[in-house]
Image (tube, grey):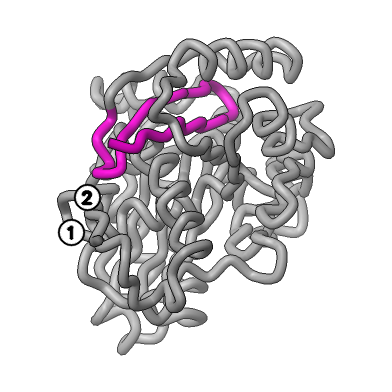
Amino acid sequence: MNEYIGIDIGGTKTAIVRGDENGTILEKKRFATTTKEETLEMIFQSVADLKTDQTKAIGVSCGGPLNSKTGVILGPPNLPGWDEVPITDMLTETFGIPAYLKNDADACAVAEWKFGAGKGTENMIFLTFGTGIGAGLILNGRLYEGSTGMAGETGHLRLFETGHIGHGKAGSFEGYVSGGGIAQYGKGTAAELGKRAEEGDPETLQIWAQTGEHLGSMLAILIDLLNPEVIVIGSIFVRAEKYLRASMEEKIRKEALKPGVEICRIVPAGLGESIGDIATVTVHIKKIREKIEFNTAKPQYIETIWGVGYRFKV
């Protein structure tokens, strides 16, 4: 059976997985994301350890900006020093197999659409909500990437004229609705604030309520602009939904058009903490379809078994 290597480069940690064509994760390595040089060394060593004779391609997902067509990472704010890194060329030259790059939100959107909380929908949005925040867009039953794969950079939108810095911009949504943004309150990391919220600390609960309100402002824009059936939110939202939802929903009701709000569900990622692993494997399947299928919307050779995986038809 064909196998694939998936690489998920995050702002705080990096994961490398070996998976098969059914979307099954066979083996995994995980380590802290440090400097560019150290992290790349760990990535290449991990790929060398996981690669087998059955490995047909390598998929990479990370936060934008990036160019998915050229396979170049273009200096994501949560990856300092990663400027103009031709990651796919580097991997292909080293290991002799095709490599592909996708925005992490796009990869996660496809994974949730095929296997998770967005299964069966035509219009879905996925929000990363980790170290940073970005959106992956499924519109009319297809992934929408934009001209160079940079569609969905919601973290760069401005919430206030000034304030917390995120995505290189003061007052941006990422400066408030992300792990990095939450840390700028100066009260600890999102994980630490989650623990204190469990203890009922009033100041911590207020920070979560404010974060939920800012998240609601972002979602109201997306609901009015794209009219999705469901918005799936990962990472921090999965763990802290109960502290965010009330203020988030109140803000959405105030700011978004009622018909759009009524048909849109807002849910945590159905794939939970495994979403990054599955997402990197789906990158390969999409790229292979683009090469062998006449119409990727109606595949003849690689069939999706919804909620299960993929099947090659011969």
- Find disc 2 in the rendering and name its residue: 309
Question: In the rendered image of this protein, does residue 129 appear above or below residue 220?
Answer: above
On the image, the x and y values in percent for residue 307 come to: 16, 54
- Residue 142 sits in quarter: bottom left
On the image, the x and y values in percent for residue 172 come to: 68, 53
Residue at image coords 52%, 23%: 14
On the image, the x and y values in percent for residue 43 come to: 59, 18
- Find disc 1 in the rendering and name its residue: 305
Is residue 260 visible to us here? yes
Magenta segment: does it hold 18?
yes
Q: Which residues are magenta?
A: 1-25
Question: In the rendered image of this protein, does residue 11 appear above or below residue 262?
Answer: above
Q: Within 10 angstroms of label 1, few (less than 14), some, or many (20 or more) residues?
A: few
Of all residues, the one furthest to the front in this rendering is: 314
Of all residues, the one furthest to the bottom in this rendering is: 259
Is label 2 in a helix, a strand or a loop? strand
73 vs 224, nearest the viewer? 73
Which quadrant is the C terminus positioned in?
bottom left
Q: Amino acid at mark 1?
A: Ile
